[in-house]
Image (cartoon, grey):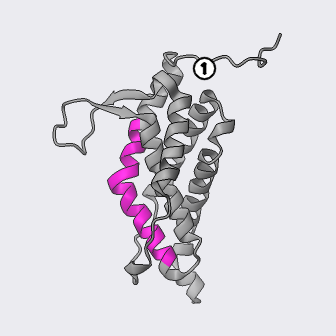
Amino acid sequence: MTEMQDDITMGKNALEMLLVANEFCFFMDNLEKKSKTDIMEFVHRVLPLMYTKGSLLPDVTVENPEANMRFVTEEQWENVFNMLREKFGDDDEYWVIDPLYINETEPLKASLSENLSDIYQDMKDFILLYQKNTIAARQNAVADCKTLFADHWGYKIGNVMLQLHHLIYSGTSKPEEEEEGLGLF
């Protein structure tokens, strides 16, 4: 077998995760052009796929942990967060029971913007590290993405999906601000 065939970081599951993460990040990098409805519909459809692909990531043995890197700056995270917060408005905050916290029975205030920005950061870091295109970078990218899925963004997807489902299907979402000149008549 060739080295390429033995490299599980180039396998179907890793590449499909990369594809879904890239679609998500591309969308988030262009939020200013999106309406609240566009964002809710896209996220509602992509997050279950992202969760599935994250759960299928292979176990990777990292041979060179020093090659691991993070790329998204606090400023980039804040830009995504602020744009989402502005778009979601009053629908941004909600209550959730989060098993990651000490008291599993007390609701905590959560934010769609914060959760989606955190997911964005993990996905963007995954993509950028993977694109370094060295075996060490790919190993670290896939291993880190899998670990963060288990510890971080997998939970966040579950929390976001509950709230999005509620907003989309219960009709409780606050209407978007009507913009001048967008009416049909």
| Residue 58 visible from this viewpoint | no
In the image, the segment drawn in magenta is 137-159
Task: Judge whether 169 appears above or below 5 on screen.
Answer: above
Task: Judge whether 20 appears above or below 129 on screen.
Answer: above
Using residue 4 as the reference point, say whether residue 181 is left or right of it: right
Using residue 161 as the reference point, say whether residue 42 is left or right of it: right
Q: Amino acid at mark 1?
A: Glu
| Residue 76 visible from this viewpoint | yes
Question: Where residue 110 appears, x then y in whole percent?
Answer: 35, 34
Pick the quarter of the image with the C terminus: top right
Q: Residue at x 44, y 78 (%)?
A: 67
The residue identified by callout 1 is 176
Asked if the magenta segment contains residue 143, the reply would be yes
Question: Where residue 49 appears, x then y in whole percent?
Answer: 53, 48
Q: Residue at x 54, y 30 (%)?
A: 86
Task: Tell me the chief SS of the magenta region.
Answer: helix
Question: Where residue 127 appears, x then y in whole percent?
Answer: 56, 63
Question: Where residue 175 appears, x then y in whole percent?
Answer: 58, 16
Which of the 4 image quarters holds residue 45?
A: top right
Asked if the magenta segment contains residue 129, the reply would be no
The furthest residue to the top = 185
Residue 81 versus residue 91: which sits nearer the camera?
Answer: 81
Residue 145 versus residue 45: which sits nearer the camera?
Answer: 145
Using residue 101 as the reference point, say whether residue 86 is left or right of it: right
Q: Residue at x 42, y 31 (%)?
A: 162
SS type, badge 1: loop
Task: Judge whether 183 appears above or below 79 on screen.
Answer: above
**Label 1 environment density (alpha carbons within 10 Å; few <14, some 14–19, many ≥20):** few
Q: How many marks?
A: 1
Pick the quarter of the image with the N terminus: bottom right
